[in-house]
Amino acid sequence: MTADARRIAFTSKTLHHVDLERAAVAALEARDFRRAFALADRRCRILPHPGARAHLLRAEALSRLDLRDAAVASVARALELEPDDLVAARRMMAWGDGLPQLEAARSIARRDDDPDSVRSALLLLEQNGQDSCARVDFLDEEVKGWVTWRGDDPQLSLAQADQSSTIQLPADPRHRFALNGRRAASFRLMRPASATSQRLEIAQVDHVIASIQLPANRAPDRRNAPQRPPRVRNGETPPLTIIIPVYRDLAATRACIESALTAVACTPGSTIVVVDDASPEPAIKHLLGELAAELRILLLTNAHNLGFVGAINRALGETGAGDVVLLNSDTIVPKYALQRLRSAVRSTPRVGTATPLSNNGEYTSFPVPNRSNPLPSPDELELLDELAGTANSGMAIDIPNGIGFCLYITRECLDAVHELSDDFYRAISKTSTSVCAPPRPVSATCASRRSLSDMRVRARFLARSVPWCCAIFASSSTDTSAMRPSARRSWLPIRCAIAARRSSSSCSPTNRAPPTRTSSSAAPRSAARSRSGDAGNWRRKTGAVSSFTSAPRESAGSPRSSIRMAELRSPSHSTLRRPRAAMLC
């Protein structure tokens, strides 16, 4: 830090990072850009981890120092942390180029209330070939917004399970965005009450301008709901339904379903339900059609893409009894994983959910937690699954929440929380938030290959979701601070077993007998919550059973380049911005 920066009077040791941000803003206002950069750069290098605002302060100082490339890089980092930050989007649209600039323009057009910013965004989009754009804002009672286009007037349709309505959107020549020959119109209509999701679509004759899935605006009436079959008695095998929502990636989908079919053959009473969530890939549709024709899977097809939550909820409506496993279509399941996962859940009292270990499963990752470990080979995966089941048999480790690439949910938990909630923004790990609350690892393992783009998207929403999730789980009786030392107890025996197996001359996976499956209870526990969300997105995961379980809870309901100092000022110490997404990592 420079001598000028050291002369600044900081008022608090615990809030030193806030003082740094305030001092950086003051330096920018005083046009001392070198000092502003020194302060903002220092803030970006210390704990607590900097947010989007700190990176924007650094970007503003770099821009004023004519270091445009470095400034754009800082803005890009801010957008990674807070994708909906309008200040960052404005900077990226003004300073950036290429695809990031266009994405920032789309974000401004959809969410900015400043007409000048929106006009600049629309002009930039049109210069790059996008001549139509729409903004849609919705509440429980109404939906409103605007649309711009060229050519024929579009139609707006609002459809739900039992009815559909369509209106014409005539051009308004006096609309504030009707410029340079572009047409525009505003709309506002009341939403009919519906216990199911609604789909809003704005389309011209040959072009869909916007298509949005709106969440239900009325709680379902469960007073006359049919009674579920009684709980199976001790000694009987409960039914198990594996739900796999599918959208893209033929190779990963094929590998996932094939591994699941093998696991189902070793798990009595289990079936597979695959949801084709309006996949745009004909090869995937052909694969699923063949499997359904052979009666190897039950296939549900969505006319429109409903997203993870919508696809899962539709499949849950088709399951009348028994437990379920939510499985991402890029997960590889070992042969005996489902059988041992179910045994682990049934042998542990008051378990709501269970999550297996994985090569890429946040804090359930093995061998290095909170990292994306290499995808093991099929033989290595089966060996890891066997070692996990043997080493962790009888253990139960509490963790803050389940990880949804392979999430086992008991029927009691489902009856408490009902369907997954679509109230949260952007499906990252809503199932973990709503269904689980403190989980444990069980003795099974899964493997995954997540794409770089998926990891970047996930990282963005994790960074903005942790504060809200911490608040959600604040009432939990589980001390999550003790989770890591406890979870290591489930990893250490596996490492020891691997070392022993490597030192043995008879460790060849091809010569070993099928492992004896015991009931392993090292599964992560998560208490059922009143709102459900969706599980995390994975690419090529594998599931070896060393899982984490959770007990069910009671359900409870619900381009401007000029600097704007007000946008960059740090909030007061007591201010907490509530994110729109919920996720705990």
Image (tube, rainbow, N blue to C red):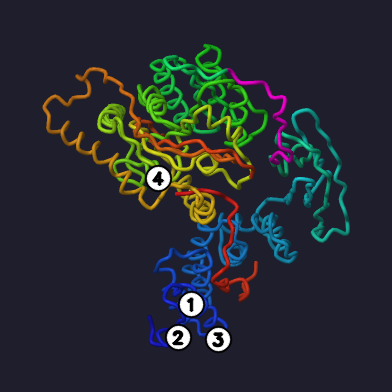
Disc 4 residue type (three-letter)? Glu
SS of the residue at dot 4?
helix
Q: Position of residue 562 (x, y in %)?
A: 63, 75
Disc 3 residue type (three-letter)? Ala
Residue located 51% across and 76% down the image = 61
Camera-side residue of 329 and 60: 329
Answer with left or right where residue 49 lies relative to residue 433: left
Camera-side residue of 511 and 69: 511
Which span of residues is magenta-colored? 214-229
Residue at the disc numbered 1: 19
Q: Is residue 188 above or below residue 29?
A: above
Q: Position of residue 166 (x, y in %)?
A: 84, 37
- Numbered label attached to residue 8: 2
> Taken as a whole, is the magenta stretch helix, strand or loop?
loop
Disc 2 residue type (three-letter)? Ile
Q: Residues within 10 Å of mark 4 (few under 14, many from 20)?
A: some
- Numbered label attached to residue 362: 4
| Cβ–Cβ under 8 Å for marks 1 and 2 | yes
Compare marks 2 and 3 and give the one earlier in the sequence: 2
Residue located 71% across and 33% down the image = 220
**To which quarter of the image does residue 119 belong?**
bottom right
Depth-wise, is mark 2 or mark 3 nearer the camera?
A: 2
Depth-wise, is mark 1 or mark 3 nearer the camera?
A: 1
Residue at the disc numbered 3: 30
Compare marks 1 and 4 and give the one earlier in the sequence: 1
Residue located 49% across and 73% down the image = 18
